[in-house]
Image (cartoon, rainbow, N blue to C red):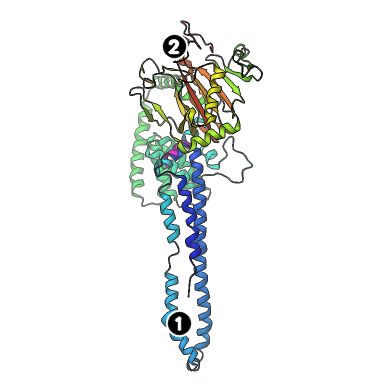
Amino acid sequence: MLVKMGVWSVCCISLLSCLLKFSSAHSDFFTSIGHMTDLLFTEKDLVTSLKDYIKAEESKLEQVKQWAEKLDALTATATQDPEGFLGHPVNAFKLMKRLNTEWGEVEDLVLKDMSDGFISNLTIQRQHFPNDEDQTGAGRALIRLQDTYQLDTQTISSGDLPGVSTDLPYKSTLSVEDCYELGKISYSEADYYHTELWMAQALKQLDEGEDSSIDVVTVLDYLSYSVYQQGELERALDNTERLLTIDPEHQRALGNLKYFAYQLAKQRKTEEQRSSAEESEKGQDKEWMKQYLPEKRKYERLCRGEGLRMTPRRQRRLFCRYHDNNRHPLYVIGPVKQEDEWDRPRIVRYHNIITEQEMEKVKELAKPRLRRATISNPVTGFLETAQYRISKSAWLAAYEHPVVDRINQRIEDITGLDVKTAEELQVANYGVGGQYEPHFDFGRKDEPDAFKELGTGNRIATWLFYMSDVAAGGATVFSDVGAAVKPMKGTAVFWYNLFPSGDGDYSTRHAACPVLVGNKWVSNKWIHERGQEFRRPCGLKETDGTR
């Protein structure tokens, strides 16, 4: 009996071709949505390979089934009159042949491992899979979005995020296992606040009847300990008691029950002895803490759209206009649309400043070279990765493609600044919850060597293209002044980082808010001081002028 398995051997070969899309080394998939899209196609190919394996297994079983059915009918007839059946020489010959040869073929067929091709391909592709760092990074990103946009765990678990279309053909929800994993990520970092939130969500879904490989006892164990670590002894005791009703022999819970009860009694005794004066003082401390607003909270509020509001008088100074940069020959007939986004520092937006074709070409050039975004170390001057910048970036030189050269020239024509001493065009794609926390683009006085290796002076100005719309989140916010600039595909924003005196404008401290929903692509040009001596002359006054 022959088994036709040639098709199975061939069907997996196509899967190998997708490996060419990846480099031999990878890391930080979660920091770029652009790179994560490749993983979707890899997974799709794996599903196709898995389905082919299932077909091969079904084909094998069908052959075994047909053989069994044929022999079942034959032996049923033969055993009714064994001597008469074997009295026919053909039947005698075929019995010898079946037992000596064909049953051996059946044995080989049954023992045939149809998974070899699939397992081989899976093993090859696994080296290109995300790793533990990616999974943890994506989990942290969800928690960061939860905090920044003040989302409850139910909203995230149900997938009903702001900006998500209700017309999508799929529903992005979190299972009990997913919530449990987020709780474990928080627990591993001693973040008991988020451990509690996500373990409580996992418990809620279990109580609602969701099927899961995670049991209630395991969730309650984490939940009670995380609550205890936050000083909530009563709730820790309640969760432990519930755990013991399910598993009365749970040794850790039995020990915790006694310990929590002892600590709770001790706490209550202490609270009774506390004077009313101390309570009043504690209340004043809490009020003082409410008034203290660190930069991180200001930044998060701006990301949520809760920033400062301009006075009507200041708003009246903001205009939209057609800009030709002092009658530049290219823009006298076709001036660009310029909009004031903010007054101090002056931030302007240029509309329809880059075409769809140009944006796609820039993405196409950048995508194969995207690497985890780096920041300049103020001490060493070298570039290094930073946890507060979740994105990947690539640098494009003008000589690499006419589109890049054309974009650079356009920036020079519109701003009036020389871009020959500017840095190359940086293209960035943000990942899951991608962000860049508050920072300055220019080197401060305590960072004299920030751009020493470039030899072109400090970063005098920043030009930022938005190359995608973002459904929710992803705004550029200026934490000191309360400005928030939303991504708008095909536009660019521009501001000066230095005053005409050469001193840094500290009001330009800005950040990229976490991307809540969507895929954020930007490209920026950092323009340096050298070459601007006659284009933007130095001055003693720290004015906000754009020239």
Instruction: Indicate whether residue 443 is drawn in magenta.
Output: no
Residue 238 visible, this angle? no
What residue is disc 1 on? 98
Quadrant of residue 117 within the rendered picture: bottom left
Amino acid type of disc 2? Gly
**Residue 223, above or below 295:** below
For badge 1, the amino acid type reads Arg
* Residue 138 magenta: yes
Question: Helix, strand, or loop for circle 1?
Answer: helix
- Is 71 rendered above or below residue 292? below
Q: In which quarter of the image is residue 350?
A: top right
Q: Quadrant of residue 183?
A: top left
Segment colored magenta: 135-141
Going from N to C along the chain, the mark reached first, 1 or 2, is 1
Q: Nearer the viewer, residue 67 or 382?
A: 382
Residue 502 circle label: 2
The count of marks equals: 2
Residue sitting at 43 percent across and 32 percent down? Answer: 373
Report x, y in % for residue 470.
Answer: 57, 32
Is the residue marked by circle 2 packed among few (<14), some (14-19), or many (20+) residues within 10 Å?
some
Which percent across, then down, holds residue 322? 64, 17
- Can the viewer see residue 189 in this picture? yes
Return the residue nearer the eye: 491 or 263: 491
Residue 498 appears at what percent x and percent y? 46, 14
